[in-house]
Amino acid sequence: MIAFITAWIKGIIFVVLFAAFLELLLPNNSMQRFVRVIMGLFIMLAILNPIIGVIEHQVTADQLPVLAARVDSNLAAADVLQATNNVAEKREQLARDLYVKDLSRQIRATVMAVDGVADAKVVVTIDNGDTGPQKTSKAMGKLKHVVVYLEPGITASERKISQVTVGVSISGAAPEAKKLPAVVVDKVTRVVTELYQLRSSQVEVRWMN
């Protein structure tokens, strides 16, 4: 620190002596006043230059923690944004799963009310809205396809016939292959398509294994 102050004072003295020597060489006219102004600026610069250097160094040292904190803040903001997007995606997925489950339950209750259905299981497919380059919220959640697995039961007309033919059996008759009654399939397809505004190609009825 002492060496720095000594060098600073020597520099000021050198500039002052140089200004005095230059003033002695110049004639007493307007040029001498101009040179005095210039040399005064040099002397001020020699005095203020170390102070300016110290101030700049201090400002830079003070700004480094601020810049580092700003970078950390930007990184933290990016992490928070990514975490928020992940939470939003998980929330949307959970909402879709609940919607699909509830929709399947509703369609099953509707199918179970059809005459000739003993049991049913429903699998639905909805539009996630991500078929294009950007997700379309208009199509999101729209019902795309329904698969109904049926276990046929006895219809009301078959129940009446069975009451009349109780005790009558035909021996030697071959067992019928598993096949869904066309009447029941048509009823189920019609009910689902009309209630949920679907095309018949979007509803598939299968035998429950």
Image: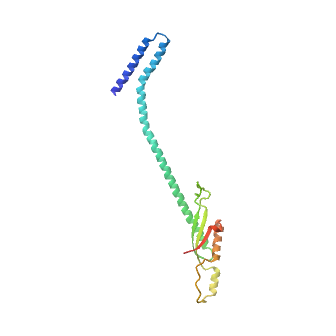
Image coordinates of residue 189 in percent, x first then y, are 64, 71
Left or right for 109, reference 19: right
Q: Quadrant of the N terminus?
A: top left
Please tell me whether residue 1 is drawn above or below residue 145 in the rendered image: above
Outermost residue to the top: 28
Residue at image position (44%, 37%) is 63
Left or right for 184, reference 68: right
Image coordinates of residue 70 in percent, x first then y, are 46, 42
Q: How has the structure been colored for display?
A: rainbow
Please tell me whether residue 52 is drawn above or below residue 117 in the rendered image: above
Please tell me whether residue 195 is drawn above or below residue 132 in the rendered image: below
Residue at image position (49%, 51%) is 82
Q: Quadrant of the C terminus?
A: bottom right
- Quadrant hosting residue 111: bottom right
- Quadrant hosting residue 156: bottom right
Image coordinates of residue 7 in percent, x first then y, are 36, 24
Number of marks drawn: 0
Looking at this view, is 144 or 115 the one in front?
144
Outermost residue to the left: 2
Residue at image position (43%, 28%) is 52
Looking at this view, is 193 or 25 the one in front?
25
Residue at image position (46%, 47%) is 76
Image coordinates of residue 115 in percent, x first then y, are 63, 76
